């Protein structure tokens, strides 16, 4: 009986301790945080992401992944449902990416916001709103790796063409021709050595010539200065031209009109003299007897149609 009593006491103690540990675990793991549900849909691979994975907003834990399944609204897409603290600033411009943790490679959801909107995303647990899920760094790297592999393949193909037997022969020939050209340049350089040696003398002669040209230019400049200075030849020539222009203007204004009048009088006198000479030529006796009476005209006594006095 005593052994049975000890066994029952031990069993009761174990049960009590177990119950206390369970209550302690429940108390320690209790979560009074209010969370809202959000959905994310993507056609990308979400390898490494598991339910209960952490959701971080710019590195700060704000929730967890509730489930991962297929999207019933978009055929072929993967649906990720997360629960996020109401205190997290989830707006209409918030977006998500799938990131991975360091060495373990376990995935988690990384939230970020580009700041285009300050309006909070309306929540509805019956039909959770959707947060855009953009490709993460791994997906971008995989896409870029395909492009890089294609470029490497093209480069290797071009390299194989470049290293073909024909191109190698052409390169060898070009190198040989370069060597021959270098030898020719050396020979030309040796032939130019005497010319190069005479360059200092030519330089001295050129310097002397330049000095002579500079001296001549200075003389011409001085002569031009003397000619153009006040009271110089150019100044006097300018004054003479001004005086000549003034004399011509005076002659034109005063003398020319008088000469024109004298010429008109001379012309009238010549015309009168010409009429007198013509009259003498027609009737020379008029110099002795005078011109006589004029011939009667029509209707006058003594008029005759033949011009003879009656």
Image: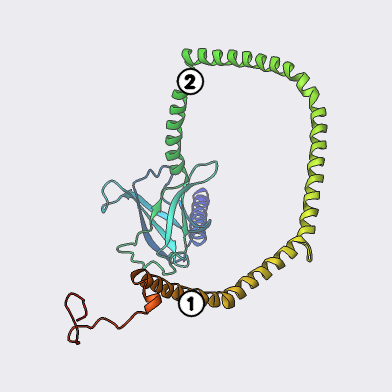
Quarter occupied by the C terminus: bottom left
CA gap, disc 1 to disc 2? Answer: 109 Å
Dot 1 alpha-carbon crowd within 10 angstroms: few under 14, some 14 to 19, many 20 or more: few
Q: In the depicted view, which residue is nearer to us: 147 or 45?
A: 147
Q: Quadrant of residue 250?
A: bottom right
The kind of secondary structure element at disc 2 is helix
| Residue at image location 40% in from the left, 76% down from the top | 288
Question: Colour scheme of this structure image?
Answer: rainbow
**Badge nearest the viewer, 1 or 2:** 1
Q: Is residue 48 above or below residue 94?
A: above
**Above or below, 172 relative to 247:** above
Q: Disc 1 vs disc 2: Cβ atoms closer than 8 Å?
A: no
Q: Position of residue 62 (x, y in %)?
A: 48, 60
Q: Residue 34 or 160: which is nearer the viewer?
A: 160
Q: Name the residue beneath numbered marker 2.
A: 162
| Rendering coords of residue 1 (x, y %) | 49, 50
At which x and y percent is residue 277?
A: 40, 70
Give the label on residue 265, or none. 1
Q: Residue at x 37, y 45 (%)?
A: 44
User: Is 78 left or right of 225, judged from the image as shown?
Assistant: left
Q: Nearer the viewer, residue 284 or 153?
A: 284
> Quick check: 57 above or below 283?
above
In the rendered structure, the answer to whether residue 190 lies left or right of residue 107 reads right
Q: Secondary structure at mark 1?
A: helix
Q: Residue at x 78, y 47 (%)?
A: 217
User: x, y percentage for residue 125?
Assistant: 33, 64
Label 2 neighbour load within 10 Å: few <14, some 14-19, many 20+: few
Identify the residue at horizontal 80%, vertical 22% (top origin).
Answer: 197
Q: Earlier in the sequence, mark 1 or mark 2?
A: 2
């Amino acid at each position: 009986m005593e052994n049975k009593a000890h066994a029952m006491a031990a069993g009761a103690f174990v049960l009590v301790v177990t119950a206390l540990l369970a209550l302690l675990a429940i108390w320690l793991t209790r979560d009074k945080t209010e969370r809202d549900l959000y959905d994310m849909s993507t056609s990308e691979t979400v390898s490494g992401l598991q339910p209960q994975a952490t959701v971080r907003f710019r590195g700060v834990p704000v929730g967890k992944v509730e489930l991962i399944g297929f999207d019933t609204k978009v055929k072929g897409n993967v649906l990720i449902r997360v629960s996020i603290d109401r205190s997290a600033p989830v707006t209409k411009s918030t977006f998500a990416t799938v990131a991975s943790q360091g060495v373990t490679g376990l995935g988690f959801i990384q939230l970020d916001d580009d700041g285009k909107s300050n309006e909070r995303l309306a929540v509805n647990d019956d039909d959770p709103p959707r947060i855009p899920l953009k490709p993460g760094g791994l997906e971008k790297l995989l896409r870029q790796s395909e492009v890089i592999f294609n470029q490497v393949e093209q480069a290797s193909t071009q390299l194989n063409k470049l290293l073909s037997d024909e191109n190698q022969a052409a390169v060898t020939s070009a190198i040989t021709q370069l060597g021959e050209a270098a030898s020719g340049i050396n020979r030309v350089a040796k032939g130019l050595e005497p010319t190069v040696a005479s360059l200092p003398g030519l330089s001295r002669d050129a310097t002397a010539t330049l000095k002579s040209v500079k001296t001549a230019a200075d003389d011409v400049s001085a002569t031009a200065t003397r000619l153009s200075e006040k009271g110089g030849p150019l100044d006097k020539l300018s004054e003479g031209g001004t005086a000549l222009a003034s004399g011509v203007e005076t002659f034109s204004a005063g003398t020319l009109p008088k000469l024109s009048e004298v010429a008109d009088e001379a012309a009238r006198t010549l015309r009168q003299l010409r009429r007198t000479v013509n009259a003498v030529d027609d009737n020379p006796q008029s110099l002795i007897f005078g011109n006589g009476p004029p011939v009667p005209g029509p209707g006058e006594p003594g008029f005759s149609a033949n011009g003879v006095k009656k």
